[in-house]
Image: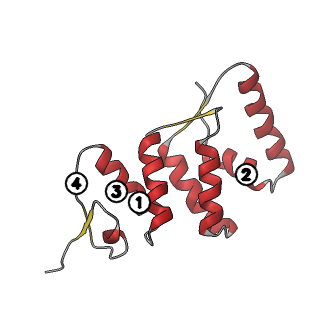
């Protein structure tokens, strides 16, 4: 199964580079026509959220809609998909950033809790705990 890097998904989503967009569409359409799904590593999703938010000024709701759409796309398969879905729900409901939500979701999926952190925002996520400074 072929896999996608962050930059391919960014070009496909934001459509800011016509030649790279065309190449991304050709690849995706070819894979779909051949009955292949495209694999997206969890690290790509993490980077994608960061790029959309910080590089393209996507608002939280836009990030939520974009990631939700990607997660429901039949032509894409995601590493740790259940943890990504949980992270998206935590991100939707709370004030912590997506990365912190994903860290908690992956730790929970691994059966390892709590996720100890010095980050007060991350500690608000269910499954995380604030580590007190000495």
> What residue did someone put label 3 on?
104
122 w.r.t. 45: above or below: below
Front-lying residue, 35 or 21 = 35
Give the quarter of the image for residue 29.
top right
Relative to residue 89, is residue 130 drawn left or right? left
Give the quarter of the image for residue 53.
bottom right
Density class for disc 4 (Cα within 10 Å; few <14, some 14-19, many ≥20) is some
Relative to residue 22, is residue 105 drawn left or right? left
Callout 3 secondary element: helix
* Residue 93 percent coordinates (x, y): 46, 65
43 w.r.t. 14: above or below: above
Q: Residue at x 54, y 55 (%)?
A: 47
23 w.r.t. 60: above or below: above
- Circles 3 and 2, Cβ within 8 Å, touching? The answer is no
Q: Residue at x 65, y 32 (%)?
A: 75
Tag 1 or tag 2, which sits nearer the N-term? 2
> What residue did someone put label 4 on?
113
Tag 4 or tag 2, which sits nearer the N-term? 2
Give the quarter of the image for residue 23.
top right
Q: Which image quadrant: the C terminus? A: bottom left
The Cα atoms of the two marked residues, 4 and 3, are separated by 8 Å
Density class for disc 3 (Cα within 10 Å; few <14, some 14-19, many ≥20) is many
112 w.r.t. 118: above or below: above
* Residue 58 percent coordinates (x, y): 66, 67
- Circles 1 and 3, Cβ within 8 Å, touching? The answer is yes
Tag 2 or tag 3, which sits nearer the N-term? 2
């Amino acid at each position: 199964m072929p896999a996608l890097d962050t930059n391919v998904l960014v070009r496909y989503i934001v459509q800011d580079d016509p030649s790279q967009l065309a190449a991304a569409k050709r690849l995706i359409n070819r894979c779909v026509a051949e009955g292949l799904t495209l694999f997206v590593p969890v690290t790509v999703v993490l980077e994608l959220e960061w790029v959309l938010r910080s590089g393209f000024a996507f608002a939280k709701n836009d990030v939520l809609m974009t990631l939700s759409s990607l997660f429901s796309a039949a032509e894409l398969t995601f590493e740790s998909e259940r943890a990504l879905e949980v992270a998206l729900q935590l991100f939707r409901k709370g004030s912590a950033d997506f990365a912190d939500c994903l860290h908690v979701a992956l730790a929970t999926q691994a059966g390892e809790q709590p996720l100890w952190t010095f980050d007060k925002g991350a500690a608000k996520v269910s499954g995380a705990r604030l580590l007190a400074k000495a």
